[in-house]
Image (cartoon, helix red, strand yellow):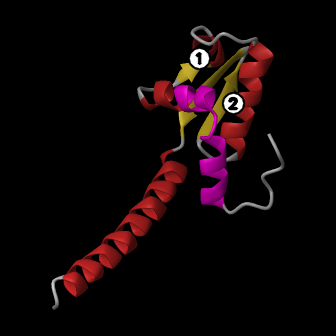
C-alpha cells in the first residue's frame, strides 16, 4: 500500500477500504471483536499477509488492536467510519440540491 501520510483522515479510510480483503475484515468486525487468527481463517492468504491488511486498517483509524499475552484482538473504531459516512452524506446532500435546482429549472420555476 502506498504511503498514506499525504491523505486526510477520510481519504485514508477510503483508501484502506479499496481492498476487498480489508472490506471483508471490516464486515466481520462490525459483528464484534475478533482475534487475528479468527479473521485469518476464512481468508486464502498467509497470516503475515492478513497482518499487513490489519496494519493498513489500523493506520487509517478503521480498527484498533490490542495484544493480551500472545493473542491480538481487533475491533472496529466507529469514529473513522462515521467521519467517512458524514463526508458521503454531505456529498449526497449537495448532489441532491443540484438535482432539485435542475428539476426546478426544467419545470420553469
For residue 41, above or below residue 36 = above
- 90 vs 75, left or right, is left
Depth check, front residue: 64 or 3: 3
Depth check, front residue: 95 or 45: 95
For residue 30, above or below residue 83 = above
Give the residue displayed 31% in from the left and 77% down from the top: 97
For residue 69, above or below residue 41 = below
x and y percent of residue 7 in the render? 73, 60
Depth check, front residue: 71 or 76: 76
Q: Secondary structure at mark 1?
A: helix
x and y percent of residue 95 in the render? 38, 70
Disc 1 to disc 2, how far (Cα)? 10 Å
10 Å crowding of disc 1: few (<14), some (14-19), many (20+): many
Which circle marks residue 57 in the picture? none
Dominant secondary structure (helix, strand or loop) of the stretch shown in magenta:
helix
The reply to whether the C-beta atoms of the residues labelled 1 and 2 are less than 8 Å apart is yes
- Quarter placement of the C terminus: bottom left
- 32 vs 47, left or right, is left
Give the residue displayed 39% in from the left and 62% down from the top: 89
Depth check, front residue: 70 or 40: 40
Q: How many marks?
A: 2
Q: Which residue is mark 2?
A: 54
Q: Which residue is mark 1?
A: 39
x and y percent of residue 84 in the render? 51, 56
Amino acid at each position: 500500500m502506498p504511503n498514506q501520510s499525504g491523505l486526510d483522515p477520510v481519504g485514508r479510510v477510503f483508501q484502506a477500504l479499496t481492498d476487498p480483503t480489508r472490506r471483508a475484515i471490516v464486515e466481520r468486525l462490525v459483528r464484534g471483536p475478533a482475534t487475528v487468527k479468527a479473521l485469518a481463517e476464512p481468508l486464502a492468504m498467509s497470516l503475515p499477509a492478513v497482518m499487513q491488511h490489519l496494519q493498513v486498517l489500523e493506520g487509517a483509524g478503521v480498527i484498533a488492536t490490542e495484544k493480551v499475552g500472545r493473542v491480538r484482538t481487533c475491533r472496529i473504531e466507529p469514529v473513522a467510519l462515521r467521519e467517512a459516512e458524514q463526508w458521503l452524506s454531505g456529498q449526497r446532500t449537495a448532489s441532491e440540491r443540484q438535482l432539485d435546482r435542475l428539476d426546478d429549472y426544467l419545470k420553469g420555476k
